[in-house]
Image (cartoon, grey):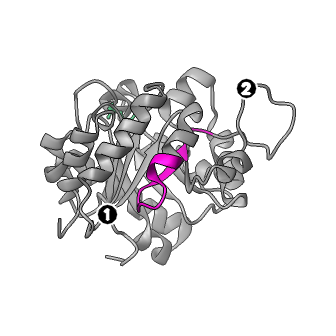
Amino acid sequence: MSESRRPLIAANWKMHHLRQDASRYCRELLRGFPPEIAADVVIFPSFTLLVTVAEGLAGSSVAWGGQDLHTEPKGAFTGDISGEQLADLGCSWVLCGHSERRRDHGESDEAVGRKAATARHFGLKPMICIGETAEERRAGATQEVLERQFRAAVAQRPEPFALAYEPVWAIGTGETATPEMAQSTHAFLRTLAARVLGETASDGLRILYGGSVKPANAASLIVQKDIDGFLVGGAGLDPGSFSGIIGSSGPGL
Ligand code: PGA
């Protein structure tokens, strides 16, 4: 396994928290943070909380990022956020193509690819989200859907990026893929990445799992060969449970 596949653990706050929650969260997270931590940690707050989180995490090893960005670098796009504006707030990462954006905002596979490329243009690392719905899995179309989403997302070669595999049926439902099920999909994605990007890029690619990850199931998922970290929703809203996931996710913790 490549050295670059250090565990990467991310919390996606979605549309939760106010400024005082965000400040308290950062204080509590950093208070319990082991200095020798063997994982990279990222928080994805709402845009309105980015300044608060940037202040709360300043000087720590925890990074932050936006939950979305526009495909275009700037312009007349009311209500949207550009990659440059995120970079201006010290973001290192940005989520691209989360299933809730695809579902609620009609984000196409092609738009996700353009977002990932725009993120790179501004020095942000895209965390590209892909995943099949329950119907697609039932229809036996999981691999076909993931391949289509992946190829479109990386069409403009937005390296370095991380890939988050999030089966839509496991997001916010309490239903997690079993470690074996997740591993077999991750192995498929790594083989696909080797075909599309080459062996070296595939070997170094961090493939995160997302969908009802909790302190209780994190350890059994992270030991899988091709699972390199997590994108956490609900359990990432509380610094205690997020720390529990971080703690069970990195070797040497
Ligand atoms: P969940 O969300 O952990 O609440 O299932 C994961 C995600 O949407 O990234």
Using residue 49 as the reference point, say whether residue 138 is left or right of it: left
On the image, the x and y values in percent for residue 250 come to 23, 63
> Dot 1 surroundings within 10 Å: few (below 14), some, or many (20 or more)?
many
Using residue 136 as the reference point, say whether residue 252 is left or right of it: left
Using residue 7 as the reference point, say whether residue 51 is left or right of it: right
Name the element at disc 2.
loop
Q: Amino acid at mark 2?
A: Gly
On the image, the x and y values in percent for residue 249 come to 22, 57
From this viewpoint, which residue is outermost toward the right?
76
- Residue sitting at 56 percent across and 40 percent down? 50
Question: Which residue lies under the disc numbered 2?
Answer: 79
- Residue sitting at 56 percent across and 21 percent down? 104
In this view, the residue in front, 55 or 171, is 55
- Residue sitting at 43 percent across and 29 percent down? 20
From this viewpoint, which residue is outermost toward the top?
104
Using residue 4 as the reference point, say whether residue 175 is left or right of it: left
Is the Cβ of the residue at disc 2 closer than 8 Å to that at disc 1?
no
Name the element at disc 1.
loop
The quadrant of the picture showing ligand 1 is top left
In this view, the residue in front, 45 or 186, is 45
Q: Amino acid at mark 1?
A: Ala
Of marks 2 and 1, which one's residue comes earlier in the chain?
1
Number of numbered discs visible in the structure rendering: 2
On the image, the x and y values in percent for residue 55 come to 51, 48
Residue 97 at least partly seen: no
In this view, the residue in front, 218 or 134, is 218
Question: Which residue lies under the disc numbered 1?
Answer: 39
- Figure quadrant of the N terminus: bottom left
- Image: magenta residue range: 55-68
- Residue sitting at 60 percent across and 38 percent down? 68
